[in-house]
Amino acid sequence: MSYSSYLLFGLALAAANLLGGLLVTSSASLARNARLLRFLIALGAGFMLAAIFVEVVPAAIELWQRERGSSPHAVLQATTLLLAGYLLIHLFEHTIAPHFHFGAETHPERLLRPTAAYAAIGGLSIHTFFDGVSIAAAFSVNFRVGLLVFIAVLLHKAPEGFTAASIMLASGRTRRKAQWATLLIGAATLLGVMSVAIAQAHVSALVAYALPFSAGVTLYVAASDLIPEVNHMEEKNPLTSVVVFVGVALFYLLHALVGER
């Protein structure tokens, strides 16, 4: 795939981040936007989990077996990288930026200090950078894998932007600074996409490492950030849990439509 194609996909993701921020900083009803994002979070969680387990992990293992032969050692290396990606984001969330999570609720009483808000935005930027890495690595495998991962990530980009802007506003920052925060996480996504696209031209084996590692990051976002949000929101609207299964069904539908690898 050409650099311009990578750039277009990266810009689309960054635009979704900005859209999520605008849902907070615009004059539209925040409550109405929050209700919309509840369902988007649930849909994205189901789609992402299905994409990771059905498409990305098998593709990562296949890459390692192609490089190292069909042995348990190759599978172990791929799954170890997946675990490393998962644990990296766990480390960032619970040490560097412990006071943020996805969704419409941001615990404003914890984010009154600007330093806490900036740390949270920094941690969120790590998430979004690896969003970009995962998409570029997936497209490097083939277009089918890339497209499914792109859709999976796209579904939670607006909630990411919504979260970033909400954190800044909850810490007393202005709407303009909230918009800059969403621009930052969008730029981090684009940087992740282009970093892999450029580096792959010089290091052909990079994708074998980037794909399972970034899959671990994505798995953390889906299983440890989004699903707990869905469980929390279920108290207000039980339908949100059903939407998770809709997301899984949507993945399988698109999986069938885009054809075999």
Image (spheres, grey):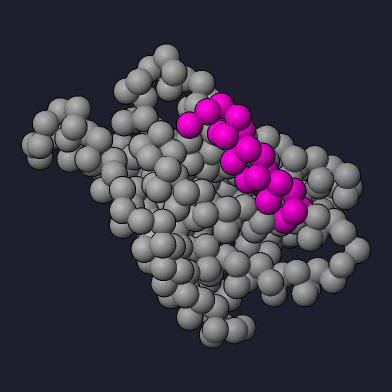
Q: Where is residue 83 in the image (x, y as percent from the top left)?
A: 31, 43
Q: Which residue sits at x=56%, y=34%? A: 6
Res 191 visible: no
In the image, farthest residue toward the left: 71
Left or right of 58, for residue 254: right
The answer to which quarter of the image holds residue 140 is top left
Vertical relation: 66 (above or below) 241: above
Left or right of 158, for residue 207: left
Res 59 visible: yes
Q: State which region is magenta.
A: 1-21
Left or right of 92, for residue 203: left
Q: Which residue sits at x=88%, y=50%? A: 175
Vertical relation: 209 (above or below) 46: above
Left or right of 146, for residue 176: right
Q: Does the magenta stretch include residue 18?
A: yes
Of residues 179 and 148, the one nearer the viewer is 148
Of residues 25 and 203, the one nearer the viewer is 203
